[in-house]
Image (cartoon, grey):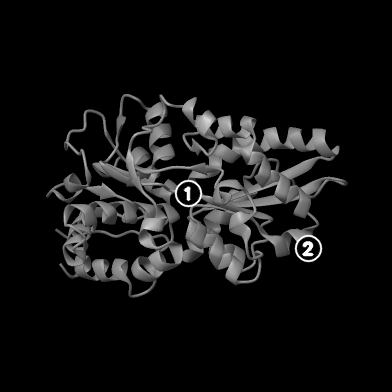
Amino acid sequence: MNKKRIVLSVALAAALAVTGILSGCGNKAAKTEGTVMLTNVSYDPTRELYQQYNPVFQQHYKEKTGKDIQIIQSHGGSGGQARSVIEGNKADVVTLALAHDITLIEKSGLIEKGWLQQFPKDSSPYTSTIVFLVRKGNPKQINDWDDLIKPGVNVITPDPKSSGGACWNFLGAWAYGQKRFNQDEEKTKDFVASLYKNVSVMDSGARGATTTFVENGQGDVLIAWENEAINSVRQQPDKFEIVTPSISILAQPSVAVVSKNAKKNKSTDAAKEYLNYLYSDEAQRIIGKNGYRPSNPDILKEFADTFDLKVQMVTIDDFGGWDKAYDTFFNDGAIFDQIMEKVNAK
């Protein structure tokens, strides 16, 4: 069966990012005199989280400093967002899907070295994991990664070349294959290739993939951020349900001050406060309500009914860290490209 692979172009992704900026929280045509300006360049699924967080932070900032702050949001695939900052997007802060995307910005000279230690928990104020979103009643009986390679199962997942969430998805599948095949790389590669052979739509970002599955009605299963799946079920409980695989991965979205831009924009202190306040109890509860796992373990417990806290998860350290993982899996010619060559050849 021929597969249709749909990937948004970099140009279109950039256009979507601009759209995110124009529709951002508190956006105005011009800066109000005496108002601090702050631009947060983030990845797709955090749109609603920051729409709720920003007004709370604005109030906190006003009470603490006596100043008003105007916050602009930008959203898109995490990899594309990182490239947009490197290419000139004047972000004051980035809140991206994985540390590697921020490291790329650091290597461009825009972010200071040591950013990972600037904020608690490796600069990850929230975490997530990867789950399956299926249609109500789970008609294809999808219970684990094995079921995604069955004939006739239509899988939706974004493209690791542009989406941070897609990288987490891929690594979750790989971790399962490694355990199933006793660390045999070739068998694991064949397993993951069988999974991607069943992928019919590969959007550039996680939110695009959710739209394809939830709104456009394509696919039998969406490999999804846990928060995306939770919010989809909340909005349409009669249409969807969540399946947690036997092995998943601890996804750690990262945050950082884009120090060179913030210094130029005279927003350094505001940028640091914006990210630091994400660790406050008030913000951690907003995070939990939006389907992300709070980094504060005590507040995480308050959401025990929301999350499966017993799911077995590997971490990026099991892959040698993000630099090694990218070299092994996602750089040009690495394992993901090898798998897609095999998939497209059939």
261 in relation to 215, above or below: below
Residue 73's tag is none
Residue linked to disc 1: 252
103 in relation to 312, above or below: below
* Residue drawn 65% across the image and 35% down it: 280
Left or right: residue 125 versus residue 147 is: right
**Residue 13 appearing in the image:** no
Crowdedness of circle 2 by 10 Å Cα count: few (<14), some, many (20+)?
few
Q: Quadrant of residue 211?
A: top left
Residue linked to disc 2: 264
State which quarter of the image contains the N terminus: bottom left
**Residue 276 appearing in the image:** yes
- Which amino acid type is marked by label 2? Lys
- Which amino acid type is marked by label 1? Gln
How many numbered discs? 2
Name the secondary structure under disc 2. Answer: helix
Task: Kindly give the residue lying farthest to the bottom in the view shown.
Answer: 333
* Residue drawn 28% across the image and 54% down it: 175
